[in-house]
Image (cartoon, rainbow, N blue to C red):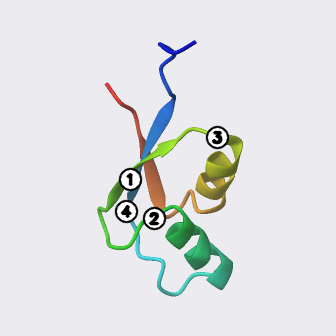
Amino acid sequence: MANEKIQTVRVRLVKSPNGCQGRHRLSVKALGLRKLNDVRVLKDSPSVRGLINQVSYLVRVETDA
């Protein structure tokens, strides 16, 4: 149990949230993204996946190789 690897997902902001819906702007902020090309490594959970799906046109999900 202690040696389980925590699943993570890397999210990069590739498009500015200016001019989009206010809820989508708040979702980007909830993901911790501030500037263009900002990258965050987040725990892969259903809530994070929901935020990513909501703003999928603004972010890119990168794989950890």
> In the rendered structure, which disc, 4 or 2, sits on the residue that comes first in sequence?
4
| Residue 19 percent coordinates (x, y) | 52, 87
Residue drawn at x 57%, y 81% is 20
Q: Do the residues labelled 1 and 2 touch (CB within 8 Å)?
A: yes
- The residue that disc 3 covers is 45
Q: Amino acid type of disc 4?
A: Val
Identify the mark nearer the N-term, 4 or 1: 4
State the quadrant of the N terminus. Answer: top right
- Residue 32 image label: 2
Q: Distance between the residues labelled 3 and 1?
A: 14 Å
Alpha carbons under labels 1 and 2: distance apart: 7 Å
Mark 2 falls on what kind of element? loop
Q: How far apart are marks 3 and 4 (CA)?
A: 22 Å
Which residue is tagged 4? Answer: 14
SS at mark 3 in the image: loop
Q: Classify mark 4: residues with Cα within 10 Å, few (<14), some (14-19) or many (20+).
A: some
Above or below, comparing residue 7 to residue 3 in the picture: below
| Residue at x 48%, y 77% (from the top left corner) | 17
| Quadrant assignment, res 51 | bottom right
Tell me the distance, in whole angstroms, between the alpha carbons under discs 4 and 1. 12 Å
